Amino acid sequence: MIEATTRLGQLATLIDAVEAAKELEDRALKAINDVIAIGKLTVPKGHQGDAPVNNWIAAMMEIYRRITGQEPATSVGHVDQPDEGIASGPFIRFLQAAGQALGLNYSEDALRSRVRTILKAHHKN
């Protein structure tokens, strides 16, 4: 009788453990959905690159406007020219020169891509 009672107690403990494990699994699955939902509300769509660098470039765009009176823009070398397909322009050179002091050494194409991303976001707002 004592042994049977002990076994029933162990069985009850195992059942409680299985129910607790199931509850943990249910909560974990719900948490995954919550994290995904929060991420969709807080994380910008698409690849945004390095936000501090993009913020610096956006600030440099305003400085460029004030210094030159021109809108920051980029261009690409034309067909049959030595710089064919390479991003360039005064604003790219401005960013490269200003970035050197900060240790930012991005290629012309990388800077152009970031500038276009910033301008695209700005035009949406």
Image (cartoon, rainbow, N blue to C red):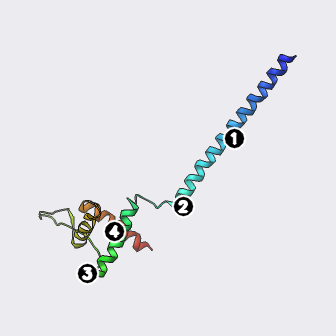
- At mark 2, the secondary structure is helix
Q: Residue at x 26, y 81 (%)?
A: 68
Q: Which numbered mark, 1 or 3, is in the foreground of this view?
A: 3
Q: Read off the residue under disc 3.
A: 68
Q: Residue at x 12, y 65 (%)?
A: 81
Q: Is residue 122 above or below residue 79?
A: below
Q: Which mark is residue 112?
A: none
Cα distance, mark 1 to mark 4? 48 Å
Q: Read off the residue under disc 1.
A: 23
107 relative position to 82: left or right: right
The numbered mark, 1 or 3, whose residue comes first in the sequence reads 1
Cα distance, mark 2 to mark 1? 27 Å
Q: Amino acid at mark 1?
A: Glu
The numbered mark, 1 or 4, whose residue comes first in the sequence reads 1
Circles 1 and 4, Cβ within 8 Å, touching? The answer is no
86 relative position to 23: left or right: left
- Residue 11 % position (x, y): 77, 25
Q: Which numbered mark, 2 or 3, is in the foreground of this view?
A: 3
Q: Read off the residue under disc 4.
A: 57
Q: Residue furthest bottom?
A: 69
The numbered mark, 2 or 3, whose residue comes first in the sequence reads 2
Q: Amino acid at mark 4?
A: Ile
The one nearer the camera, 110 or 2, is 2
Q: Which numbered mark, 1 or 4, is in the foreground of this view?
A: 4
Cα distance, mark 1 to mark 3? 63 Å
Cα distance, mark 4 to mark 3? 16 Å
53 relative position to 77: left or right: right
Q: Badge 2, how many Cα within 10 Å: few under 14, some, many 20+?
A: few
